[in-house]
Image (cartoon, rainbow, N blue to C red):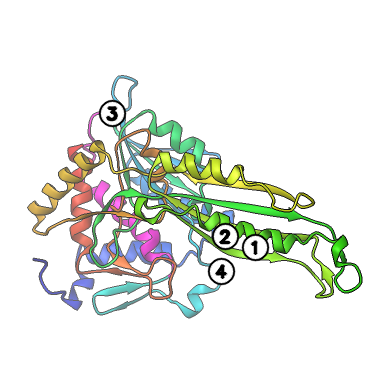
């Protein structure tokens, strides 16, 4: 059992060092929309990597840090992290970095600057003794918006790796590691009909809104919660003046799927939708931007190793499958992947975002043991 948290521990190692480095990153606001700000975070982390003797490269905005000896004969251990956050500039003014009891608060602290800080503390503990094949760290700039720029680099490196560790935050409350994630996608359905006067000639019009309403129900009927498949229409727009039959409408659909089979079913079904009114045209755009991270044997073997290390540290570690996506979704179909190895806490994307200081050092210890043992 984890001992009670001592507030004075924030002035001692390793928490003092963890907090110092966390504050450095949190106080560089880095929304994905400002790539210069994201690069400022990457620059700081690159300095940490250089201090540890890493080879540092820039791959189209993604920073690559290579630790140890790399050779074609031995595949590397790949670690994924991201430098961007969902928080816009100015958030620090109302959500400052602060320690309150056993929690440290700040925008991007839990998701996932704490993961970056914990990773580099874990790397320092190795003392330059890296596993065969070395360790490769990718620090991407755009995870929070779907990793559009980074997906190719991530997939290419996963094909050369023997295992992937993702330092996204642990599951809230249980602080479990993540052994599966739903696939994530977004579709946009756009409708073009015929405008007409709603009072004098309604029969000459073809309502895009009416067609959209019918298709909203058709799309949401594709959900199968028992299989982990959900579809939610979260935004709809269209029309103009109330006395005009609307010629334009559209809506956006959030899609979550737990298996590749469900991915194929949803893709086929949405692309096959046909208008009820032949005078209205329908255009579908978007799709799945992250495949499902299925809970496979390779991932469970990685978790079991992490669980044993946690037991040695003195705490029980659980695993869970979650609904949100990460860059681990991109690597899991390619290579055994274990996610949630970042900071324990709660409040990702929320104003109460925080890290649990009483548990954080233990999670860093488990990560360091994995980096050494794998």
Range shown magenta: 107-132
Q: Is 110 part of what is drawn in magenta?
A: yes
Look at 74% across and 53% down and name the residue there: 277
Q: Earlier in the sequence, mark 4 or mark 1?
A: 4
Under tag 3, what secondary structure?
A: loop
Please tell me how crowded label 2 is: few (under 14), some (14-19), or many (20+) other residues with Cα within 10 Å: few
**What residue occupies the far top of the structure in this picture?**
73
Question: In which quadrant will I find the N terminus?
Answer: bottom left
Of the numbered discs in the image, which one, if any, rests on residue 133?
3
> Separation of disc 2 and disc 1 at Cα?
7 Å
Q: Which residue is mark 1?
A: 213
Of the numbered discs in the image, which one, if any, rests on residue 40?
none
Give percent across and percent down for residue 177.
25, 53
> Separation of disc 2 and disc 4 at Cα?
38 Å
Residue 33 visible to the viewer:
no
Give percent across and percent down for residue 66.
36, 36
Q: Earlier in the sequence, mark 2 or mark 4?
A: 4
Give percent across and percent down for residue 48.
37, 50
Whether residues under marks 2 and 3 lie with C-beta atoms below 8 angstroms apart, the answer is no
Nearer to me, 135 or 142: 142
> Separation of disc 3 and disc 4 at Cα?
40 Å
Whether residues under marks 1 and 3 lie with C-beta atoms below 8 angstroms apart, the answer is no
Q: Earlier in the sequence, mark 2 or mark 3?
A: 3
Vertical arrangement, residue 14 with respect to residue 186, above or below: below
Whether residues under marks 2 and 1 lie with C-beta atoms below 8 angstroms apart, the answer is yes
Q: Which residue is mark 2?
A: 217
Q: Earlier in the sequence, mark 3 or mark 4?
A: 4
Vertical arrangement, residue 109 with respect to residue 283, above or below: below
Q: Which residue is mark 4?
A: 89
């Amino acid at each position: 059992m984890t001992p009670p948290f001592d507030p004075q521990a924030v002035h001692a190692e390793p928490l003092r060092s963890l907090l110092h480095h966390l504050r450095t990153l949190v106080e560089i606001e880095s929304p994905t929309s400002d790539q210069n700000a994201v690069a400022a975070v990457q620059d700081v982390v690159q300095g940490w990597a250089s201090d540890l003797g890493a080879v540092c490269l820039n791959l189209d905005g993604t920073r690559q840090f290579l630790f140890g000896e790399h050779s074609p004969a031995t595949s590397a251990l790949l670690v994924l992290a991201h430098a961007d956050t969902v928080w816009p500039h100015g958030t620090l003014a109302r959500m400052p970095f602060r320690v309150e009891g056993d929690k440290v608060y700040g925008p991007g602290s839990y998701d996932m600057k704490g993961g970056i800080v914990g990773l580099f503390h874990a790397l320092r503990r190795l003392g330059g003794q890296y596993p065969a094949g070395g360790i490769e760290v990718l620090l991407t700039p755009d995870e929070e918006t779907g990793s559009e720029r980074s997906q190719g680099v991530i997939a290419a490196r996963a094909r050369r790796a023997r295992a992937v560790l993702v330092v996204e935050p642990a599951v809230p409350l249980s602080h479990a590691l993540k052994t599966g994630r739903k696939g994530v996608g977004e579709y946009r359905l756009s409708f073009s009909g015929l405008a007409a006067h709603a009072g004098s000639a309604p029969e000459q019009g073809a309502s895009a809104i009416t067609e959209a309403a019918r298709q909203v129900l058709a799309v949401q009927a594709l959900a199968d919660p028992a299989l982990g498949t959900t579809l939610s229409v979260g935004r709809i727009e269209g029309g103009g003046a109330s006395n005009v039959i609307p010629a334009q409408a559209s809506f956006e659909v959030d899609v979550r799927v737990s298996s590749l089979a469900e991915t194929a079913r949803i893709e086929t079904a949405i692309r096959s939708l046909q208008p009820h009114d032949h005078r209205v045209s329908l255009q579908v755009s978007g799709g799945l931007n992250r495949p499902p991270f299925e809970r496979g044997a390779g991932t469970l073997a990685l978790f079991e190793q992490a669980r044993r290390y946690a037991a040695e540290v003195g705490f029980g570690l659980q695993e869970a499958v979650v609904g949100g996506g990460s860059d681990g979704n991109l690597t899991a179909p390619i290579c055994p992947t274990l996610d949630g190895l970042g900071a324990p806490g709660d409040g990702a994307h929320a104003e109460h975002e925080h890290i649990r200081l009483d548990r954080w050092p233990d999670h860093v210890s488990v990560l360091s043991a994995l980096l050494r043992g794998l």
